[in-house]
Image (cartoon, rainbow, N blue to C red):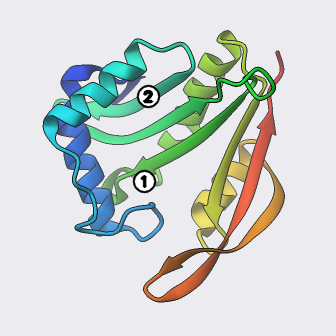
Amino acid sequence: MEIREVRANDAQSMLDLMYQLDRETKFMMLEEGERKTTLEQQEKILESFAENSTKSMFVISDEHGVHGFVAGIGNTAHRNRHSMYCVMGIKQSASGNGYGKQLLGHLEAWAIEHGFSRLELTVMCHNERAYNLYLNYGFEVEGTKRNSLKVDGNYVDEFYMSKLLRT
C-alpha cells in the first residue's frame, strides 16, 4: 500500500470506496443509497483538488484500488484562510494498520507547505477509534455539537476538534 495525492484517474476507485464506506459504516455523512455522484462528477471533483492550492486529498492505494482517503478543504475568506477542514474515511479491511496517522501526516505537511496553520474536523462522540486517533495525533476538543446528526433515528453528538500547526 502507498499513500499519495489523489489523481483524476482514481475517480472510479474513489467512487467504489465512497459507496463501500456508505455501506459499512455509520460514521460517514451519507447513508447507504444517499450518494448520487456519477463518474463524470467524481472526475471533476478530483480534478478540482489537483488544480487548487486551498485543498488536497491523499489516498491509500494499491493495485486493487483506493482503500482510504483524507481530504482537507481550506477556507478562502481572508479572515479564515489559515484554516482547513478535514474529512477521512478508511475501509474496515484496511483499518488498524496505522494508515489514518500516515494520511494525517501527509495532509498536515501539505497544509503547512501551503500556509495553513489550523486543521479542524468533527467526529461522532461515540466513534472511539477515530476520536483516539485524532487525540493521539494532537487534535484537541474545542466543543460538543449537540444533536449534530441523526443516525438511525437517534440524535448523535459530535466533538469539534482542531490542531494548531507549527508554521
* Residue type (three-letter) at the residue carrying disc 2: Phe
In the image, taking residue 45 as reference, residue 111 lies left or right, namely right
Q: Is residue 98 in view?
A: no
Is 117 in front, or is 136? Answer: 117
Query: In the rendering, which numbered label is found on residue 58?
Result: 2
The relative height of residue 51 versus residue 152 in the rendered view (above or below) is above
Q: Residues within 10 Å of mark 2 (few under 14, many from 20)?
A: many
In the image, taking residue 122 as reference, residue 79 lies left or right, namely right
Q: Residue at x 81, y 26 (%)?
A: 79
> Quarter holding the N terminus?
top left
Q: Farthest front residue?
A: 77
As measured in the structure, the alpha-carbon distance from the residue carrying label 2 to the one carrying label 1 is 16 Å
Q: Which badge, 2 or 1, comes first in the chain's sequence?
A: 2
The relative height of residue 88 versus residue 151 in the rendered view (above or below) is above
In the image, which is nearer the foreground, mark 2 or mark 1? 2
Task: Name the secondary structure under disc 1.
Answer: loop
> Quarter holding the C terminus?
top right
In the image, taking residue 92 as reference, residue 148 lies left or right, namely right
Query: In the rendering, which numbered label is found on residue 95?
Result: 1
* Residue type (three-letter) at the residue carrying disc 1: Ser
Q: Residue at x 27, y 26 (%)?
A: 44
Residue 121: image x %, image y %? 65, 48
Is 63 in front, or is 130? Answer: 130
